[in-house]
Image (cartoon, rainbow, N blue to C red):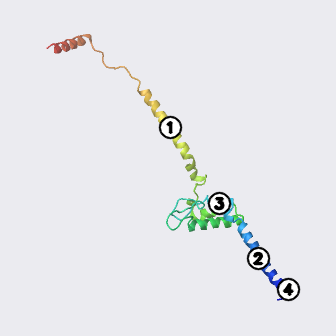
């Protein structure tokens, strides 16, 4: 083997090793889209639609048995969110696409518009109305409780004397 051939083989190996190292570092250090804070936050704004949990796609974690971790449905939803984030879609567009695909139940929090605004204000308004009604009932009961003197026809003094005599006679016997 000559010096030039030996140098060529070493150069080819060095270039191959260097390109492998560059590719490894590029894939190892490049943040994945589903690791981005925006993708993680968005995946927590859609429910996992596997039917086996009540978690969001970002927090789905089935424990126990031979399987532990996010289910395939949650992984697919996270991947879709990451792809849409990579494309540059807005948060509202991404969430709306999931609503169109799965319906409004895909959102853990109902939107604060239309009929669902009742869901947001009912926990505050209902107890206030209940307290007002209780206060009003108690206030009216207090007015009725005032004692009035016993009324009725006047009793003549002769009837009172007769009643006293008869009462006294019955206890002496």
Pinpoint residue 25: horizontal percent, then vertical percent.
Answer: 74, 69
Q: Secondary structure at mark 1?
A: helix
Q: Rate crowding at label 2 as few (under 14), some (14 to 19) or many (20 or more) other CA atoms within 10 Å.
A: few
Image quadrant containing the C terminus: top left
Image point 20% across, 14% down: which residue?
167
Q: CA distance from mark 2 to mark 3?
A: 35 Å
Corner quadrant of residue 143: top left
Q: Earlier in the sequence, mark 4 or mark 2?
A: 4
Residue, disc 3? 40
Q: Which mark is residue 131?
A: 1
Circle 2 sits on which residue?
A: 17
Viewer-closest of 37 and 21:
21
Whether residue 56 sits left or right of residue 139 in the image: it is right
* Secondary structure state at the residue bearing disc 4: helix
Q: Residue 3: which disc? A: 4
Q: Nearer the viewer, mark 3 or mark 4?
A: 4
N-terminal-most mark, 1 or 3:
3
Q: Earlier in the sequence, mark 1 or mark 4?
A: 4
Seen at 57% across and 52% down, the residue is 116
Q: Earlier in the sequence, mark 3 or mark 4?
A: 4
Label 1 to label 4: alpha-carbon separation: 97 Å
The answer to which of marks 2 and 3 sits earlier in the sequence is: 2
Query: Contact (CB < 8 A) between labels 2 and 3?
Result: no
CA distance for labels 2 and 1: 76 Å
């Amino acid at each position: 083997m000559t010096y030039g051939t030996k140098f060529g083989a070493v150069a080819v190996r060095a270039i191959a090793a260097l390109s492998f190292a560059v590719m490894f570092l590029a894939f190892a250090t490049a943040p994945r889209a589903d690791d981005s804070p925006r993708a993680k936050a968005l995946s927590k704004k859609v429910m996992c639609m596997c039917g086996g949990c009540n978690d969001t796609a970002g927090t789905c974690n089935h424990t126990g048995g031979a399987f532990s971790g996010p289910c395939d449905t949650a992984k697919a939803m996270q991947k879709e969110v990451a792809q849409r984030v990579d494309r540059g879609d807005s948060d509202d567009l991404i969430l709306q696409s999931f609503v169109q695909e799965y319906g409004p139940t895909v959102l853990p929090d109902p939107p604060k518009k239309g009929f669902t605004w009742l869901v947001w204000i009912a926990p505050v308004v209902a107890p206030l109305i209940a307290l007002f009604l209780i206060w009003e009932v108690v206030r009216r009961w207090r007015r009725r409780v005032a004692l009035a003197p016993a009324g009725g026809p006047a009793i003549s003094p002769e009837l009172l004397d007769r009643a006293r005599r008869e009462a006294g006679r019955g206890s002496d016997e």
